[in-house]
Amino acid sequence: MRPNRSFITLDEFTIRETRRFPKATGELATILRDIGLACKLINEKVKKAGLVDILGAEGATNVQGEEQMKLDVFSNDILKNVLENSSECAGVASEEEEDFVVFDDEYSNNSKYVVLFDPLDGSSNIDVNASIGTIFAIYKRTSKLGEACNEGDFLQKGRLLMASGYVIYGSSTMLVYATKLGVNGFTLEPAFGEFCLSHPNLKCPEDGSIYSINQGNYNKFDDDVKSYLDFCMDNENKKSYRHRYIGSMVSDLHRTLIKGGVFMYPADKQNEHGKLRLMYECNPLSFIVETAGGKSTDGKGDPILDIEPQELHQRVPIYIGSKNMVDKIHSFKKA
Ligand code: P6P
Protein backbone atom coordinates (compact mmCIF):
# COMPACT_ATOMS: atom_id res chain seq x y z
CA MET A 1 0.00 0.00 0.00
CA ARG A 2 1.37 3.43 -0.94
CA PRO A 3 1.74 5.68 2.14
CA ASN A 4 -0.40 8.80 1.92
CA ARG A 5 2.51 11.21 1.54
CA SER A 6 2.00 14.68 0.09
CA PHE A 7 5.65 15.83 0.03
CA ILE A 8 8.66 15.11 -2.14
CA THR A 9 12.14 15.68 -0.74
CA LEU A 10 15.03 17.47 -2.46
CA ASP A 11 16.87 14.18 -2.98
CA GLU A 12 13.80 12.51 -4.51
CA PHE A 13 13.27 15.51 -6.78
CA THR A 14 16.87 15.66 -8.03
CA ILE A 15 16.82 11.91 -8.73
CA ARG A 16 13.59 12.36 -10.75
CA GLU A 17 15.28 15.21 -12.67
CA THR A 18 18.27 12.93 -13.35
CA ARG A 19 15.99 10.30 -14.87
CA ARG A 20 14.89 12.85 -17.47
CA PHE A 21 18.42 12.72 -18.92
CA PRO A 22 19.11 9.16 -20.18
CA LYS A 23 22.88 9.72 -20.08
CA ALA A 24 22.89 11.40 -16.66
CA THR A 25 24.70 9.45 -13.96
CA GLY A 26 23.38 11.25 -10.89
CA GLU A 27 26.57 13.16 -10.01
CA LEU A 28 24.82 16.54 -10.05
CA ALA A 29 22.06 15.14 -7.82
CA THR A 30 24.78 13.97 -5.43
CA ILE A 31 26.41 17.39 -5.26
CA LEU A 32 23.03 19.05 -4.63
CA ARG A 33 22.37 16.53 -1.85
CA ASP A 34 25.76 17.33 -0.31
CA ILE A 35 25.17 21.10 -0.47
CA GLY A 36 21.76 20.52 1.11
CA LEU A 37 23.43 18.64 3.97
CA ALA A 38 26.02 21.41 4.50
CA CYS A 39 23.29 24.05 4.59
CA LYS A 40 21.25 22.05 7.10
CA LEU A 41 24.33 22.04 9.33
CA ILE A 42 24.76 25.81 8.82
CA ASN A 43 21.04 26.31 9.50
CA GLU A 44 21.34 24.52 12.82
CA LYS A 45 23.99 27.04 13.94
CA VAL A 46 22.33 30.12 12.40
CA LYS A 47 18.99 29.37 14.09
CA LYS A 48 20.58 29.44 17.53
CA ALA A 49 23.37 31.94 16.91
CA GLY A 50 22.31 34.01 19.90
CA LEU A 51 22.58 31.04 22.25
CA VAL A 52 26.06 29.78 21.58
CA ASP A 53 29.31 31.65 21.59
CA ILE A 54 29.34 31.95 17.84
CA LEU A 55 28.13 35.52 17.45
CA GLY A 56 30.41 38.37 16.78
CA ALA A 57 33.54 38.81 14.78
CA GLU A 58 36.11 36.08 14.34
CA GLY A 59 38.72 38.76 14.77
CA ALA A 60 40.04 38.16 11.27
CA THR A 61 39.28 39.75 7.93
CA ASN A 62 38.63 37.92 4.64
CA VAL A 63 40.20 38.54 1.23
CA GLN A 64 37.71 41.35 0.72
CA GLY A 65 39.10 43.08 3.78
CA GLU A 66 35.70 42.52 5.43
CA GLU A 67 35.54 41.57 9.10
CA GLN A 68 34.86 37.83 9.29
CA MET A 69 31.98 36.83 11.56
CA LYS A 70 32.42 33.47 13.32
CA LEU A 71 29.45 32.05 11.40
CA ASP A 72 31.14 33.00 8.08
CA VAL A 73 34.14 30.92 9.03
CA PHE A 74 32.02 28.03 10.32
CA SER A 75 29.85 28.03 7.19
CA ASN A 76 32.86 28.13 4.88
CA ASP A 77 34.53 25.23 6.71
CA ILE A 78 31.34 23.14 6.67
CA LEU A 79 30.84 23.57 2.92
CA LYS A 80 34.50 22.75 2.21
CA ASN A 81 34.40 19.69 4.45
CA VAL A 82 31.16 18.26 3.02
CA LEU A 83 32.21 18.85 -0.59
CA GLU A 84 35.70 17.43 -0.01
CA ASN A 85 34.02 14.25 1.25
CA SER A 86 31.62 14.25 -1.69
CA SER A 87 32.45 11.85 -4.49
CA GLU A 88 31.57 14.44 -7.11
CA CYS A 89 33.54 17.64 -6.39
CA ALA A 90 37.10 18.35 -7.53
CA GLY A 91 37.53 21.63 -5.70
CA VAL A 92 35.86 24.82 -4.47
CA ALA A 93 36.24 28.59 -4.51
CA SER A 94 34.76 30.80 -1.81
CA GLU A 95 34.32 34.42 -0.85
CA GLU A 96 36.22 33.47 2.31
CA GLU A 97 39.19 31.87 0.50
CA GLU A 98 41.92 33.92 -1.22
CA ASP A 99 42.41 31.28 -3.92
CA PHE A 100 40.48 28.22 -5.14
CA VAL A 101 40.90 25.06 -3.06
CA VAL A 102 41.94 21.84 -4.84
CA PHE A 103 40.79 18.53 -3.31
CA ASP A 104 43.84 16.74 -4.61
CA ASP A 105 42.96 13.10 -3.97
CA GLU A 106 42.10 10.24 -6.34
CA TYR A 107 38.31 10.50 -5.87
CA SER A 108 38.17 14.29 -6.20
CA ASN A 109 40.52 14.39 -9.19
CA ASN A 110 38.11 12.07 -10.98
CA SER A 111 35.09 14.24 -10.11
CA LYS A 112 33.31 16.11 -12.87
CA TYR A 113 32.30 19.28 -11.01
CA VAL A 114 33.66 22.29 -9.12
CA VAL A 115 31.63 24.49 -6.78
CA LEU A 116 31.90 28.20 -5.95
CA PHE A 117 30.04 29.67 -2.99
CA ASP A 118 29.44 32.60 -0.73
CA PRO A 119 29.02 30.59 2.48
CA LEU A 120 27.07 33.19 4.44
CA ASP A 121 26.01 36.23 2.45
CA GLY A 122 24.74 39.22 4.37
CA SER A 123 26.56 38.09 7.48
CA SER A 124 26.65 41.62 8.90
CA ASN A 125 22.94 40.99 9.59
CA ILE A 126 23.66 38.02 11.88
CA ASP A 127 23.85 40.02 15.09
CA VAL A 128 20.51 41.71 14.40
CA ASN A 129 18.70 38.49 13.45
CA ALA A 130 17.89 39.57 9.90
CA SER A 131 17.73 36.83 7.26
CA ILE A 132 20.98 35.76 5.57
CA GLY A 133 21.90 33.16 2.99
CA THR A 134 24.29 30.78 1.28
CA ILE A 135 24.86 31.08 -2.50
CA PHE A 136 26.36 28.31 -4.67
CA ALA A 137 27.37 27.80 -8.30
CA ILE A 138 28.17 24.43 -9.91
CA TYR A 139 30.28 24.09 -13.09
CA LYS A 140 31.37 21.04 -15.04
CA ARG A 141 35.21 21.03 -15.09
CA THR A 142 37.00 21.90 -18.29
CA SER A 143 40.28 20.30 -17.12
CA LYS A 144 41.20 16.63 -17.62
CA LEU A 145 39.61 14.07 -15.31
CA GLY A 146 42.18 12.29 -13.19
CA GLU A 147 44.20 15.48 -12.68
CA ALA A 148 43.76 18.21 -10.09
CA CYS A 149 41.27 20.92 -11.04
CA ASN A 150 42.70 24.29 -12.11
CA GLU A 151 41.74 27.98 -12.24
CA GLY A 152 40.11 27.62 -15.64
CA ASP A 153 37.55 25.24 -14.12
CA PHE A 154 36.33 28.10 -11.93
CA LEU A 155 36.68 31.11 -14.25
CA GLN A 156 33.78 30.12 -16.51
CA LYS A 157 31.08 32.59 -17.52
CA GLY A 158 27.69 32.21 -15.86
CA ARG A 159 26.03 31.06 -19.10
CA LEU A 160 27.94 27.75 -18.65
CA LEU A 161 26.60 26.96 -15.18
CA MET A 162 25.25 23.43 -14.72
CA ALA A 163 23.25 24.52 -11.68
CA SER A 164 23.15 27.28 -9.09
CA GLY A 165 21.14 28.06 -6.02
CA TYR A 166 20.82 29.68 -2.64
CA VAL A 167 19.59 28.85 0.83
CA ILE A 168 17.82 31.61 2.73
CA TYR A 169 17.88 31.33 6.53
CA GLY A 170 14.72 33.34 7.18
CA SER A 171 11.38 32.83 8.91
CA SER A 172 11.67 29.42 7.30
CA THR A 173 14.77 27.94 5.70
CA MET A 174 14.44 27.49 1.96
CA LEU A 175 16.70 26.08 -0.73
CA VAL A 176 16.08 27.39 -4.26
CA TYR A 177 18.06 26.00 -7.18
CA ALA A 178 18.06 26.16 -10.95
CA THR A 179 19.18 23.86 -13.73
CA LYS A 180 18.35 24.45 -17.38
CA LEU A 181 15.12 22.51 -16.66
CA GLY A 182 13.81 25.25 -14.36
CA VAL A 183 13.81 26.78 -10.88
CA ASN A 184 12.37 24.98 -7.84
CA GLY A 185 12.11 25.89 -4.14
CA PHE A 186 12.29 23.55 -1.16
CA THR A 187 11.38 24.41 2.43
CA LEU A 188 13.17 22.72 5.31
CA GLU A 189 10.78 20.61 7.40
CA PRO A 190 12.32 20.80 10.88
CA ALA A 191 10.30 17.78 12.06
CA PHE A 192 12.47 15.42 10.04
CA GLY A 193 15.18 17.67 8.66
CA GLU A 194 14.46 17.37 4.94
CA PHE A 195 14.09 20.06 2.28
CA CYS A 196 10.61 19.44 0.78
CA LEU A 197 9.36 20.79 -2.55
CA SER A 198 7.23 23.83 -1.72
CA HIS A 199 7.68 26.17 -4.71
CA PRO A 200 7.70 24.10 -7.94
CA ASN A 201 8.61 25.73 -11.25
CA LEU A 202 9.25 29.23 -9.88
CA LYS A 203 8.80 32.11 -12.37
CA CYS A 204 10.00 35.70 -11.89
CA PRO A 205 7.00 38.05 -12.52
CA GLU A 206 7.54 40.01 -15.74
CA ASP A 207 6.75 43.26 -13.92
CA GLY A 208 6.70 44.56 -10.35
CA SER A 209 6.53 47.66 -8.17
CA ILE A 210 9.36 47.11 -5.68
CA TYR A 211 12.77 48.65 -6.25
CA SER A 212 15.59 47.54 -3.97
CA ILE A 213 18.77 49.60 -3.62
CA ASN A 214 20.87 51.19 -0.88
CA GLN A 215 19.23 54.61 -1.12
CA GLY A 216 21.94 55.94 1.23
CA ASN A 217 24.33 55.91 -1.72
CA TYR A 218 22.06 58.20 -3.80
CA ASN A 219 24.56 61.05 -4.04
CA LYS A 220 27.28 58.70 -5.28
CA PHE A 221 25.23 57.26 -8.14
CA ASP A 222 25.53 58.27 -11.79
CA ASP A 223 22.83 60.62 -13.09
CA ASP A 224 20.93 57.87 -14.94
CA VAL A 225 20.52 55.84 -11.73
CA LYS A 226 19.42 59.00 -9.88
CA SER A 227 16.88 59.70 -12.65
CA TYR A 228 15.40 56.21 -12.30
CA LEU A 229 15.17 56.56 -8.50
CA ASP A 230 13.55 60.00 -8.89
CA PHE A 231 11.06 58.40 -11.30
CA CYS A 232 10.23 55.67 -8.74
CA MET A 233 9.80 58.26 -5.97
CA ASP A 234 7.67 60.62 -8.08
CA ASN A 235 4.22 60.49 -6.47
CA GLU A 236 2.74 61.91 -9.67
CA ASN A 237 3.67 58.60 -11.22
CA LYS A 238 0.63 56.71 -12.44
CA LYS A 239 2.31 53.56 -11.09
CA SER A 240 3.28 53.68 -7.41
CA TYR A 241 6.58 52.07 -6.44
CA ARG A 242 7.72 50.77 -3.07
CA HIS A 243 11.28 50.70 -1.77
CA ARG A 244 12.48 47.61 0.11
CA TYR A 245 16.09 46.93 1.11
CA ILE A 246 17.23 44.25 3.61
CA GLY A 247 20.93 44.61 2.91
CA SER A 248 21.27 40.85 2.45
CA MET A 249 21.43 40.02 -1.25
CA VAL A 250 19.88 36.55 -0.92
CA SER A 251 16.90 38.03 0.97
CA ASP A 252 16.40 40.94 -1.43
CA LEU A 253 16.80 38.59 -4.40
CA HIS A 254 14.37 36.00 -2.99
CA ARG A 255 11.67 38.66 -2.54
CA THR A 256 12.36 39.91 -6.07
CA LEU A 257 12.03 36.38 -7.50
CA ILE A 258 8.78 35.66 -5.64
CA LYS A 259 7.01 39.06 -5.81
CA GLY A 260 8.68 40.69 -8.80
CA GLY A 261 10.67 43.92 -8.66
CA VAL A 262 14.27 44.88 -9.26
CA PHE A 263 17.38 44.68 -7.09
CA MET A 264 20.25 47.02 -7.96
CA TYR A 265 23.79 47.42 -6.75
CA PRO A 266 25.18 49.97 -9.25
CA ALA A 267 28.72 51.15 -9.69
CA ASP A 268 29.24 54.50 -8.00
CA LYS A 269 31.90 57.17 -7.56
CA GLN A 270 33.65 55.09 -4.86
CA ASN A 271 33.11 51.58 -6.32
CA GLU A 272 33.57 51.76 -10.09
CA HIS A 273 32.74 48.02 -10.40
CA GLY A 274 30.04 47.99 -7.75
CA LYS A 275 30.36 45.85 -4.61
CA LEU A 276 28.93 42.42 -5.40
CA ARG A 277 31.07 39.58 -6.67
CA LEU A 278 30.53 38.06 -10.11
CA MET A 279 31.52 34.43 -9.56
CA TYR A 280 29.68 33.46 -6.36
CA GLU A 281 26.95 36.09 -5.99
CA CYS A 282 25.89 37.67 -9.28
CA ASN A 283 26.36 34.73 -11.67
CA PRO A 284 24.51 32.08 -9.61
CA LEU A 285 21.63 34.43 -8.77
CA SER A 286 21.43 35.69 -12.37
CA PHE A 287 21.27 32.08 -13.64
CA ILE A 288 18.28 31.51 -11.35
CA VAL A 289 16.47 34.72 -12.30
CA GLU A 290 17.06 34.35 -16.06
CA THR A 291 15.95 30.68 -15.94
CA ALA A 292 12.79 31.91 -14.14
CA GLY A 293 12.12 34.42 -16.96
CA GLY A 294 13.68 37.52 -15.39
CA LYS A 295 16.66 39.60 -16.50
CA SER A 296 20.08 40.49 -15.07
CA THR A 297 22.56 42.97 -16.52
CA ASP A 298 25.64 44.95 -15.50
CA GLY A 299 23.88 48.23 -16.30
CA LYS A 300 25.69 48.67 -19.59
CA GLY A 301 23.25 46.31 -21.31
CA ASP A 302 25.47 43.21 -21.07
CA PRO A 303 23.81 40.17 -19.45
CA ILE A 304 25.72 39.24 -16.29
CA LEU A 305 25.86 35.63 -17.52
CA ASP A 306 27.85 36.60 -20.61
CA ILE A 307 30.67 38.39 -18.76
CA GLU A 308 34.00 36.64 -19.32
CA PRO A 309 35.52 36.30 -15.82
CA GLN A 310 39.02 37.67 -15.25
CA GLU A 311 39.57 36.75 -11.60
CA LEU A 312 37.79 34.88 -8.80
CA HIS A 313 36.81 37.87 -6.67
CA GLN A 314 35.97 40.41 -9.34
CA ARG A 315 33.04 42.73 -8.69
CA VAL A 316 30.30 43.80 -11.10
CA PRO A 317 27.41 46.24 -10.99
CA ILE A 318 24.09 44.37 -11.10
CA TYR A 319 20.48 45.17 -12.04
CA ILE A 320 18.40 42.00 -11.60
CA GLY A 321 14.71 41.05 -11.48
CA SER A 322 11.52 41.55 -13.46
CA LYS A 323 12.30 41.89 -17.16
CA ASN A 324 10.14 45.01 -17.66
CA MET A 325 11.70 46.80 -14.68
CA VAL A 326 15.27 46.07 -15.79
CA ASP A 327 14.35 47.30 -19.27
CA LYS A 328 12.81 50.46 -17.74
CA ILE A 329 16.07 51.20 -15.93
CA HIS A 330 17.98 50.89 -19.21
CA SER A 331 15.61 53.45 -20.76
CA PHE A 332 17.18 56.01 -18.38
CA LYS A 333 20.71 55.11 -19.48
CA LYS A 334 22.53 57.68 -21.54
CA ALA A 335 22.07 56.72 -25.18
P1 P6P B 1 25.48 47.72 1.47
C1 P6P B 1 26.17 41.92 2.33
O1 P6P B 1 27.32 42.46 2.95
C2 P6P B 1 26.30 42.18 0.83
O2 P6P B 1 27.43 41.54 0.32
C3 P6P B 1 25.04 41.72 0.12
O3 P6P B 1 24.45 40.62 0.72
C4 P6P B 1 24.15 42.95 0.20
O4 P6P B 1 23.23 43.01 -0.88
C5 P6P B 1 25.16 44.09 0.12
O5 P6P B 1 26.41 43.58 0.61
C6 P6P B 1 24.74 45.26 1.00
O6 P6P B 1 25.72 46.27 0.81
O7 P6P B 1 26.62 48.55 0.92
O8 P6P B 1 24.13 48.21 1.01
O9 P6P B 1 25.53 47.51 2.97
Image (cartoon, grey):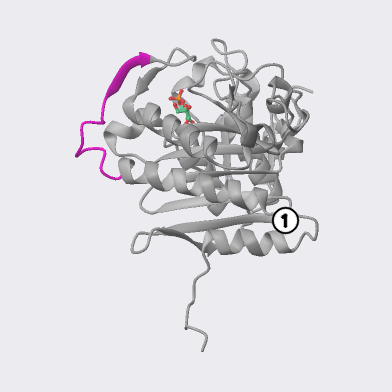
Give how far across and how far down residue 115 sits, in percent. Answer: 61, 34
Q: In the rendered image, which quarter is residue 70 located in?
A: top left
Name the foreground residue: 271 vs 41: 41
Q: Compared with residue 214, is residue 135 higher up or lower down, i.e. above or below?
A: below
> Crowdedness of circle 1 by 10 Å Cα count: few (<14), some, many (20+)?
few
Give how far across and how far down residue 282 sits, in percent. Answer: 61, 32
Per the image, label 1 sits on a secondary structure element best described as: loop
Report if residue 280 is visible in the image.
yes
Magenta stretch: residue 58 in it? yes
Q: How many marks?
A: 1
Q: Which residue appears at 49% of the width and 49% of the height?
A: 36
Give how far across and how far down residue 173 sits, in percent. Answer: 41, 51
Q: In the rendered image, which quarter is residue 11 located in?
A: bottom right
Q: In the rendered image, which quarter is residue 237 located in?
A: top right
From the image, tell me which residue sits under label 1: 181
Report if residue 238 is visible in the image.
no
Instruction: Kindly identify the amino acid type of the residue bearing the numbered disc 1.
Output: Leu
Please identify the dominant SS of the magenta region.
Answer: loop
Q: Compared with residue 231, is residue 204 higher up or lower down, i.e. above or below?
A: below
Q: Which residue appears at 75% of the width and 26% of the height?
A: 307
Name the foreground residue: 122 vs 117: 117
Quarter that holds the C terminus: top right
Q: Magenta residues?
A: 47-60
Give how far across and how far down residue 251 sits, in percent. Answer: 46, 42
